Image: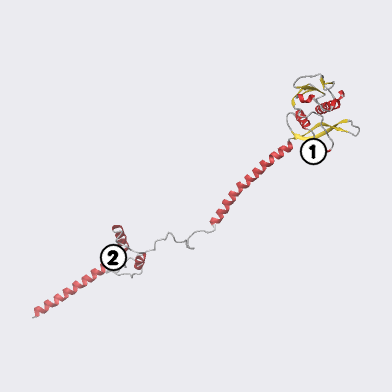
Amino acid sequence: MAIRKNNKKSVSRGAQVVVVFWIIFVIVIISVFIANSQTIFKNLKILFPGETSVTEEDLLAEDQLQEVQIGNDRPAPVITIEPAADPAATVQPSDPVRTEDPPVQTQQQTQQQTQPQQQQTQTSSQQQNQPQQQAAQDMRTRVFYFAQVDRDGQIRQSRVTRRLPASNTPLQDALNAMLVGPNPGELSGNLLSFIPQNTRLLSVTIRGSTAYVNFSDDFRFNKFGVEGYIAQLRQVVWTVTEFENIRDVQILIQGRVIDYLGEGIFIGAPLSRQSF
């Protein structure tokens, strides 16, 4: 009977040892699992992406687990899992981002964009003003003659000055202005032109002190008679001899010298102011 009791005691002690062993083994397995839970979940996601679903709440819950002491008195590593950054989340005030820099950059860019526009505006205004200044500088005073009838019915020459654009042919410019006739202001001053209408200046040539002025055939026909012919010749001769280097004028009709104009007015030789 003593042998049976000893056997029972040894069996019960063996069973206790086995139970304690399994308890310790389970505790160790759980501790290892907890310590490596993040790695295990990541591997499960890689191996079974459709079957394993681990949320951030599960991982955050692990952060609250208490440390488990293992037999060697070393604390099990504490795993801290930070929540993944949300792409749609707004930047918190603690983030090292300056909110004042963009307006400064925008202001600088605006100034840089405004300066070329101002320079371009100044350049365009200068370009617009240049033709006006150039036109004002290129104007010259030209003198030519019209006629005026006094109270006694006598025709007298009247000197007119105008500002005309400068050119290399000032004499031609003065004669063309004379052929156009008086402007409204001059007409109001009783100025007239006795040169026949539609007369055109064909050419002007200067040889020495003589100017050869070539008119169209219309210059030959004056409806005012002798006095009209003399008045139109005076207008031409006085206008041309206004230039200091010209002393007399040879009238040409269609490039040819003719002896008489109208009713016996001789024009076959150069005419000066003393010819009348």
Closer to the camera, 208 or 273?
A: 273
- C-alpha separation, residue under disc 1 versus residue under disc 2: 113 Å
- Residue that lies at the very extreme toward the bottom in this rendered image: 1
Q: Residue at x 24, y 70 (%)?
A: 24
Percent x, y for residue 13?
16, 75
Residue underneath mark 2? 33
Percent x, y for residue 58?
34, 66
> Element under label 1?
helix
What residue type is disc 2 on? Phe
Q: Residues within 10 Å of mark 2 (few under 14, many from 20)?
A: few
Q: Which quadrant is home to the C terminus? A: top right
Q: Which quadrant is home to the N terminus? A: bottom left
Percent x, y for residue 49?
31, 58
Left/right of residue 176 with respect to residue 9 in the rendered view: right
Q: Residues within 10 Å of mark 1 (few under 14, many from 20)?
A: few
Q: Is residue 91 above or below residue 116?
A: below
What residue type is disc 1 on? Pro
> Element under label 2?
helix
Residue underneath mark 1? 184
Marks 1 and 2 in Cβ contact (< 8 Å): no
